[in-house]
Image (cartoon, rainbow, N blue to C red):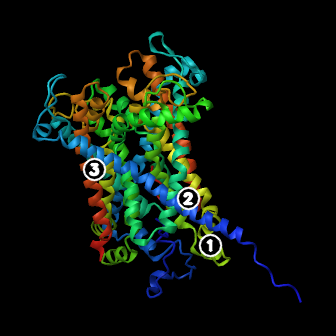
């Protein structure tokens, strides 16, 4: 949504000269309006209640900050043991052996990155296609329906995607897709080995379905922020509709689209349940996408409640900390990129 | 006299036409391709779930492995309990935060809070689960509905806050001015006039946040933990619908798989009803109360 700042856009009210113009005839710059002047000067009788109200509300606002600080503190505090024990080597050690207190997170990092990147490769072209269709091609009557349906994809809980992945997608992959891929693309080494259905490929596909609505809705928002006269200008030069979209719209919006894609990446990295249910959960690094893998989020989901020993628990929390830091960076980056296109008011929700 | 400019050969035009048609086809195709999984999920939920949803499913607790029958009544009620706790904490905090952002937040601190809220929105739910675990469960030394509710509440705050802010900003300033002009104190004007005018939109935001956390499983794994029996004490491990679906789905028993589908159907119906209700309210205009 792109509503302008109500305070900045508000014109001084000329008919209230005693309020609008002070004795010094200070020029109204728009940032300080009548309303704000009234706001800052409550009537005497309500000064104290207003102050209390303001404090309570400010505390509610502060609580968001406190929660984030608490998250950081708890994660760092609880992973201290593992941080001291393994240092940075934690993330390139590839032995995950709770029995012998050996913890290396590389298989999980690898699984997280591969499944997310796979999801992006599958999801991004289609998300952009959907967004382009909705903003540039769609009949007005269909527009709301299609955006609603795509949004509905985001409303399905991940555990249901997981359930569907296990019982519908995995058999489908095993019977049709994997034999096909193995036969024609087996030479790449990406599609070989036993065909379980469950595995990295299934996780990538499920993740792709889950991030499409996010990437599509951000892209749609960014595309509709492109000024209309850009489109008209390109069309006036004799461009076809596709050329208009390519030169007039996509080129102007590309930074915002990248922001949407990164936001989708953030969601994919942290997604837990659906991935846990379909990826196969084996801490190995295999080149083949048919092989089972393991992600950072799934190892926490599977092992946290039965982790015995402080070091084990601490290692799991450290994985959580890494996940938190990565999604933090990814989200901040995405937010900056999207905002650079749509202006500060766009809501970036993951 | 110069030759009149000759147009380029028709092949270029053909290529451009082809690209144009191709792009349109790709866009339409991707819409279809994206909607196929949506349809597939719903169709399978209906086909596989509807057969197992019956009165027993809605009123009984799970039977031990091997016995058929039983249901998820305790999980449905448990979910309700956890969501009640979550809403009780998350919605007031979120609305408070949203009011601050809209009414007082046009400054650096407001931008900072807005940024933090977006950061919090992007934190993976499993990480929030870890934090709720170490704040509540570790202190109490047992799993509880409180800890699950807290985890979900944390997830609700940023969504509710940003939605509230957005809706409050849509309330015309003249309404605020009118209220203040009548001598109503600022706090009263904000709550009874501004917030009230935007109430439909704010409720929408709350319901969206509710629907979003209703299906969350990851943060409940080691906070609410799940329970095979009736439990109404929020200080005890509590069953939750998504959690039960997860446990049943990864189990090796066919009976449990059927129950998982039925549970998923119930869950999705609840969520879709909430989202559709939201859609109807919003399509009638956010600020109905204001006019």
Q: Which residue is mark 1?
A: A230
Residue A58: name its quadrant. Answer: bottom left
Classify 10 Å Cα crowding around label 1: few (below 14), some (14-19), many (20 and above).
some
Q: Which residue is mark 2?
A: A339
Left or right of residue A328, residue A149 in this image: left
- Kindly identify which numbered label has been placed on residue B271: 3
- Kindly report which numbered mark, 2 or 1, lies closer to the viewer in this rendering: 1
SS category of the residue bearing label 3? helix
Write the residue at 45% across / 14% down: A98
- Quadrant of the frame with the N terminus of chain B: bottom right
A236 versus B23 height, above or below: below
Residue A189: name its quadrant. Answer: top right
- Asked whether the beta carbons under mark 3 and mark 1 sit within 8 Å of each other, the answer is no
Left or right of residue B54, residue A150 in this image: right
Write the residue at 26% across / 41% down: B264
Marks 3 and 1 sit apart, C-alpha to C-alpha, by: 40 Å
Residue A150: name its quadrant. Answer: bottom left
Q: Nearer the viewer, residue B202 or B96?
A: B202
Same chain for mark 3 and mark 1? The answer is no
């Amino acid at each position: 949504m792109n509503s302008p700042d109500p305070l900045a856009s508000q014109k001084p009210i000329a008919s209230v000269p005693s309020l609008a113009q002070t004795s010094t005839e200070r020029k109204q710059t728009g940032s300080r309006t009548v309303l704000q002047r009234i706001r800052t000067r409550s009537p005497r009788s309500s000064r104290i209640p207003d102050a209390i109200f303001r404090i309570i509300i400010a505390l509610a606002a502060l609580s968001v900050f406190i929660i984030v600080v608490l998250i950081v503190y708890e994660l760092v505090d609880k992973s201290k043991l593992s941080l001291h024990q393994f240092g940075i080597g934690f993330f390139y050690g590839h032995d995950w052996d709770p029995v012998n207190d050996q913890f290396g997170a590389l298989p999980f990092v690898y699984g997280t990155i591969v499944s997310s990147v796979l999801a992006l490769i599958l999801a991004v072209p289609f998300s952009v296609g959907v967004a382009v269709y909705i903003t540039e091609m769609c009949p007005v009557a269909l527009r709301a329906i299609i955006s609603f349906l795509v949004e509905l994809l985001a409303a399905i809980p991940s555990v249901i995607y997981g359930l569907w992945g296990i019982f519908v997608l995995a058999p489908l992959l095993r019977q049709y897709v994997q034999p096909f891929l193995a036969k024609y693309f087996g030479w790449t080494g990406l599609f070989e080995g036993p065909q379980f259905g469950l595995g990295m490929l299934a996780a990538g596909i499920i993740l792709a379905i889950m991030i499409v609505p996010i990437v599509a809705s951000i892209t749609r928002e960014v595309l509709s922020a492109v000024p209309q006269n850009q489109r008209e200008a390109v069309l006036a030069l004799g461009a076809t509709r596709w050329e208009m979209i390519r030169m007039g719209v996509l080129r102007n919006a590309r930074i915002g689209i990248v922001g949407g894609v990164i936001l989708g990446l953030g969601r994919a990295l942290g997604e837990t349940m659906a991935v846990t249910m379909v990826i196969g959960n084996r801490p190995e690094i295999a080149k083949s996408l048919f092989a089972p893998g393991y992600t950072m989020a799934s190892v926490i989901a599977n092992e946290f409640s039965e982790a015995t020993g402080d070091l084990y628990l601490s290692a799991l929390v450290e994985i959580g900390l890494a996940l938190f830091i990565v999604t933090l960076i990814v989200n901040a980056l995405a937010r900056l990129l999207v905002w650079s296109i749509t202006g500060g008011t766009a809501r970036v929700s993951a | 006299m110069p030759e009149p400019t000759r147009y380029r050969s028709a092949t270029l035009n053909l290529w451009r036409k082809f690209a144009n048609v191709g792009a349109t086809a790709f866009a339409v195709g991707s819409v279809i391709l994206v909607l196929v999984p949506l349809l597939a999920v719903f169709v399978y939920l209906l086909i596989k779930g509807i057969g197992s949803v019956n009165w027993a499913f809605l009123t009984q607790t799970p039977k031990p492995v091997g016995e058929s029958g039983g249901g998820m009544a305790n999980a449905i009620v448990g979910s309700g309990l956890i969501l009640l706790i979550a809403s009780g904490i998350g919605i007031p905090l979120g609305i408070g935060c949203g009011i601050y952002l809209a009414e007082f937040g046009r400054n650096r601190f407001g931008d900072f809070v807005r940024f933090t809220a977006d950061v919090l929105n992007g934190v993976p739910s499993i990480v929030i689960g870890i934090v709720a675990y170490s704040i509540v469960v570790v202190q109490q030394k047992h799993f509880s509905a409180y800890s699950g509710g807290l985890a979900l509440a944390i997830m609700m705050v940023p969504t509710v806050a940003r939605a509230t802010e957005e809706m409050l900003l849509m309330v015309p300033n003249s309404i605020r001015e009118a209220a203040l002009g009548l001598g109503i104190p600022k706090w009263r004007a904000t709550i009874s006039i501004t917030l009230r005018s935007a109430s439909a939109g704010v409720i929408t935001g709350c319901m969206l946040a509710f629907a979003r956390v209703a299906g969350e499983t990851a943060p409940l794994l080691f906070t609410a933990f799940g329970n095979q029996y009736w439990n109404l004490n929020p200080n005890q491990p509590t069953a939750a619908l998504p959690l039960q679906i997860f446990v049943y789905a990864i189990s090796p028993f066919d009976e449990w798989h059927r129950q998982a589908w039925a549970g998923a159907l119930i869950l999705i119906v609840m969520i879709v009803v909430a989202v559709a209700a939201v859609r109807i309210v919003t399509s009638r205009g956010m600020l109905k109360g204001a006019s």
